[in-house]
């Protein structure tokens, strides 16, 4: 075996190791795939902030409820550092007649069990529940906010 052949073989092994490391280190959206209670559906919705119903999202600290997306609708908030979108069904129980949460300023509340969450982080406010709100992807293009799963 020549030195060039050995170097080529070592280079191929290193390249294969790097490829495998990158392949297996990629993660999914953990919160969405590990919650046994809610199975988010695929959707994509465009919110144009030039329209009155979405115009409040131009300003930090404002949140809205959008009924025609997600499992039970979505909450969208301008956090001041970006736009975030969350599923509007309580992640800590199976969707049912009362699992749709209500928007209360920058918080979401479930009337079934009294669970409350902040729309800034998706964390519950007091009970240290096992699941946070389910977050959706958000991208922006000019005055358009695209929320998708």
Image: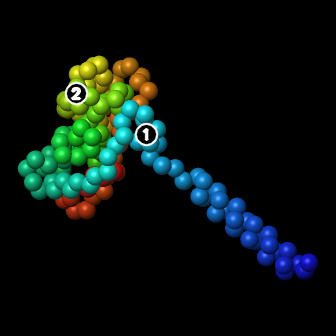
* Residue 2 location (% of width, % of height): 90, 80
Classify 53 as above or below 124: below
| Residue receiving disc 2 | 97
- Regarding mark 1 in the picture, which secondary structure is present there? helix
Q: Residues within 10 Å of mark 1 (few under 14, many from 20)?
A: some
Residue 61 is situated, as x and y percent measured from the top left of the image, at: 22, 39
Q: Quadrant of residue 31?
A: top left
**In this rendering, position of residue 66 left or right of residue 9:** left
Residue 98 position (above or below residue 16)? above
In-image side of 99 versus 123 (left or right): left
Which quadrant of the structure image shows residue 11? bottom right
- Residue at 35 percent across and 27 percent down: it is 93
User: Which of these two is toward me, 55 or 39?
Assistant: 39
In the picture, residue 125 is in which quadrant? top left
Please report the residue visible at 21 percent of the width from the left and 56 percent of the height from the top.
46
Say if 85 sits above or below 8 in the image: above
Res 123 seen here? no
**Left or right: where 6 falls relative to 14:** right
Instruction: Give the residue drawn at x 24%, y 38%.
Output: 72
Point 36% across, 40% down: residue: 39
Viewer-side residue, 95 vs 91: 95
- Residue at the spot of label 1: 31
> Which scheme is used to colour this image of the protein?
rainbow
Mark 2 surroundings within 10 Å by alpha-carbon count, few (fewer than 14), some (14 through 19), many (20 or more): few
**Does label 1 or label 2 sit earlier along the sequence?**
1
């Amino acid at each position: 075996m020549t030195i060039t052949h050995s170097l080529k073989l070592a280079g191929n092994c290193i390249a294969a190791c790097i490829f495998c490391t990158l392949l297996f280190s990629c993660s999914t959206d953990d919160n969405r795939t590990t919650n046994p209670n809610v199975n988010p559906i695929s959707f994509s919705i465009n919110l144009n902030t030039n329209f009155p119903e979405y115009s409040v999202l131009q300003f930090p600290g404002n949140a809205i409820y959008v009924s025609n997306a997600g499992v039970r609708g979505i909450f969208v908030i301008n956090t001041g550092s970006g736009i975030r979108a969350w599923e509007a069904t309580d992640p800590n129980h199976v969707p049912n007649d009362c699992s749709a949460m209500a928007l209360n300023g920058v918080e979401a509340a479930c009337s079934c069990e009294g669970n409350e969450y902040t729309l800034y982080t998706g964390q519950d406010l007091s009970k240290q529940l096992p699941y946070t709100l389910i977050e959706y992807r958000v991208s922006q293009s000019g005055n358009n906010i695209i929320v998708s799963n």
